[in-house]
Amino acid sequence: MKTLIIVDPQYDFMPGGSLEVEKGDEIIPVINSISDEFELIVATQDWHPDGHSSFASSHNGKKQFDKIEWKGMEQVLWPDHCVQGSKGANFHEALKIDSVEAIFRKGMNPDIDSYSGFYDNEHKKSTGLSGYLKEKKASELYFCGLAADICVYFTLKDAINEGFKVNLIENATRPLDEGDFAEQKKELKSLGVNILKSTEL
Ligand code: VGL
Ligand code: ZN
């Protein structure tokens, strides 16, 4: 079953948001234009408590985008973003959500970040997305959303490891860092990810 997964289409990742992705809002009309192609549509939502450990503001003397060692892993310190119940955590209002069947939230544990829509960054806790997709017999997954080089990238890698057929709609995603994303696309292709445009669906 052809399934669309929309990663974190939230205001804080849009221009003007606290962790804005350049031209991030341009993906919204593209996603709206392709939703009829899919039998199942789900979304993920970054959903942090106030004072989350991934926020620079939670660490004395640290600046936004500093990197620290946290629980044995490298952690980028982000601006406060997608705080539960805040405007920035909401989906872009122009996104057609009537056909989104389920929303998988992530990043609620204050001590651990969660880029992927499937697992936290320690790979300890599942969001339930994989089991949901398998129960729905959703074998062919198409991904879009923000940010291409962070949450979309880690979601794609987990999707491959979970055994799904993985596609990335490249004009329905935007990266924080174009250079990082260019490298990641090479890696993803070598792992079997099909990268296509929305017009090729
Ligand atoms: C994201 C950084 C921190 C994302 C979420 O959705 O790409 N990036 N939290
Ligand atoms: Zn986050």
Image (spheres, helix red, strand yellow):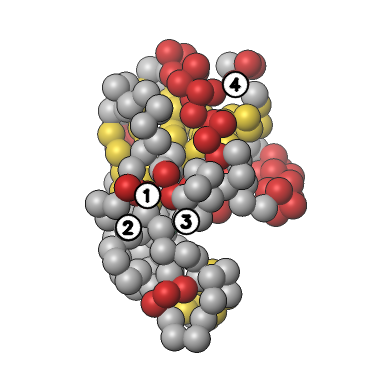
Q: CA distance from mark 4 to mark 2?
A: 31 Å
C-alpha separation, residue under disc 3 versus residue under disc 2: 11 Å
Q: Which residue is mark 2?
A: 83
Q: Residue at x 63, y 32 (%)?
A: 170
Residue that label 3 marks: 18
Q: Residue furthest top?
A: 36
Residue designated by label 4:
198
- Under circle 4, the secondary element is helix
- Asked whether 188 or 103 is in front, the reply is 103
Residue 157 in view: no
Residue type beneath disc 3: Ser
The quadrant of the picture occupied by the N terminus is top left
Q: Please identify the residue farthest to the front as the structure is shown.
A: 16
Residue at the far bottom: name it.
61
Amino acid on which the number 4 mark rests in the picture: Ser
Which mark is first along the chain, 1 or 2? Answer: 2
Where does residue 47 sit, x and y in percent of width and height? 32, 54
Gap between marks 1 and 4 measured at Cα: 27 Å
In the displayed structure, 125 sits above or below 53; it is above
Q: Quadrant of the C terminus?
A: top right
Q: Which residue is mark 1?
A: 88
